[in-house]
Image (cartoon, coloured by chain):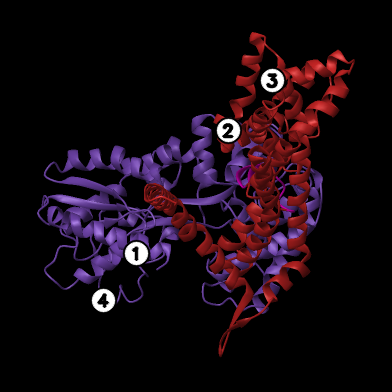
Amino acid sequence: MNRRQLIRCTFAAAALVAAPSVAFADVNRIDVYITGDSNIINFWNNIIKPAYESAHPEYTLNVVSARNAIAPIVERTLAALGTEVDPQVDIFDENDPNLPAGAIEKGLWVDFTEAGLQNYDKINPVTIETNYGLPYRGTQVVLAYDTTKLAPENAPKTWAELVAWMKENPGQFTHNRPDTGGSGGNFVRRAIHEANGRDPSLFRIDNYVQGESDELLAKGFELLKEIAPYTYGPGSYTADNMQSIQMLAQGVITMAPVWSDMALDAVNKGVLPETIAFTQLTDLAFAGGFADMTVPTNAGNLEATLKLADLVLSEEIQTKVVTEIGAFPAIGWEHLPEELASKYSNLQPASIPTFPGGPWVSAISDGWFRNVAPHVNR
Amino acid sequence: MSTVEAATAAVKRRHVDGRGLIGLLLVAAPVTLIGALILWPVSVSVFDTLTVRGPDGRHFSLESYRFFFSDGFSLRNLWLTIQVAAICTVLLLVISLPIALYLRFSETRLAGYIQALALFPLFVPSILLAYALIRTLGPNGTVDILLTAVGLPKIPSPYLTPWGPIIGLVWDNLPLTLLIILAGLSNVSRASIDAARDVGAGSFAVLWYIVLPRIRGTLLVAASFIILGLFSAFTLPYLLGPAVPEMMGPFMRRTIIEVDDPLQARTQAVVTFMICALFAMFYVRSVARTRREQSS
């Protein structure tokens, strides 16, 4: 039995012990399972829960942190499908409806195109990946830069402009290592996209072939080697997302790729000065993604849950998505207050390319560390 | 032998046997824990690295070690770890010895404050230390601000170079080294130093002929402890060090989590473990020798 199985068994045993008390629980309770970090749990508890409960006083929201143990809860819901048993799950805040395989065909998830949500049409179409997932908060890697050293009108808009700027301003750019944090990882992935005709469709979760695919990656690594002498150090890549932000805050560098929600949060908390601005490449954006809510069709309080999902997409909550957790709103900016839209207009995602995980992750990490990182030495 | 004497001897023996059993029971718990949580997983790992799974079951192979020792990238990481460990150990002994000597033989109140200050790093988590060092010694950090204020050029920042983790690890390991050396110095009696002084020995002669010979074993113990800690260091090398070469701690973590290659990660761990075992042997031998000297 490995550690993960042991943890699962422990959870299962604990659930069994807790089961009788749950079974007789309040029928007017909506169980919300959260996959995100504590900031997301706080967001549901402090923002969404009071808003929903004041609008629908007959219901209470039960916010549960599932973190990485979401798979057994989804399995439990699937097992209850077609029976009279209440799965004790009404909504998942971030869940891939494609998992487990076949769940959609079995009718586990609510099809939101037919759910009659008032706010569904306000959703920015580029954020929708599936009919069975309801995007509500997003994040994407953007370029953060210091406007005291680089005027916004001169901020690079394409990969070629970015490289040209780096060569003119050596030592003013860094990104974190692709193995941690993801902002540097998605910068590396953007280079791989650039070297392969900016065609993200070449990279799919199921098409990694050793050797053949490594050649595609190697072309990206060549681009990164070309710019390595112009990075800070040169070749000093920070350890994590936060260190890149710190380098920017200490005025050491002018530009770094950052996660939009982390950087907005840093600006709101004063870690980054107000003079930091953001830009996105327009020829092909950096990778990112949206968190999709899913609702099981056998949820105990299906109707009330759909009202909850509708509320999360309302102007009120979507504004808070931007201001409280620094994430992208899922609904179009035209549906949000104008001053908010103008402040964060540069962060509006025109498109959000994705890069698959699985075997690609190890190939990119190993390849970058062996080829790109040692290319220049400080 | 009278019956009384025989009976007494039997009672004594039974008494000794009973004590032995209780003693064995007392050590059973830690021995079981070490066996189950350390020795067993370690031997499974070692076994895994020495075998490959073929179509006809597992068979012996040195392939994973052949890869490690022929892979320039892995060797460079190992070499960096050894270098950092060596530099840190020398620095720590050189810094700790004078402080320890001062604390041992000074009787002023200042010594108390200095001891508190020297032990302070013991209570600072290394992640806080890493961020603090970035803020102070990092580019445009506090040191740079102070230097610029008096018109001096900025320092070449140790952040993201091998010197970053070296500075952090020395700071982090200072209290432990100091405590070990202080304990060793308690074996050096003031009388022997006074006697040497009386016959005209200078400070250096006292240190070289009286103090150092008495704490040689202690210094070896301190060095072994530091090296064992450095080989498993993760946070400081990860946050303060360069992307490549990596120290073994971050390298092993990345190999198992990111590169998804448990076999190589285990091989790296076994190689690291063998080097550490060498130093652990010094330590055990030193302790055993001290025991022998004390009991004779």
Relative to A103, residue A190 above or below: above
Name of the residue lying farthest toward the top: B108
Residue situated in front as seen by the camera: A124 or B94: B94
Mark linked to residue A272:
2
Inspect the magenta stretch and tell me whether residue B235 lies in it. yes
Residue identified by numbered label 3: B104
Please give the count of numbered marks on the rendered protein. 4
Q: Identify the residue at image location x=44%, y=35%.
A: A339
Q: Identify the residue at image location x=62%, y=31%.
A: B132
Please tell me if label 2 and label 1 are on a single chain.
Answer: yes
Rendering coords of residue A277 (x, y %) = 60, 38
Horizontal side, residue B125 vs residue B187: left or right:
left
Q: Can residue B20 be seen in this view?
A: yes
- Label 3 or label 1, whichever lies nearer to me, is 3
Q: Chain A's shade in the image?
A: purple
Please tell me if label 4 and label 1 are on a single chain.
Answer: yes
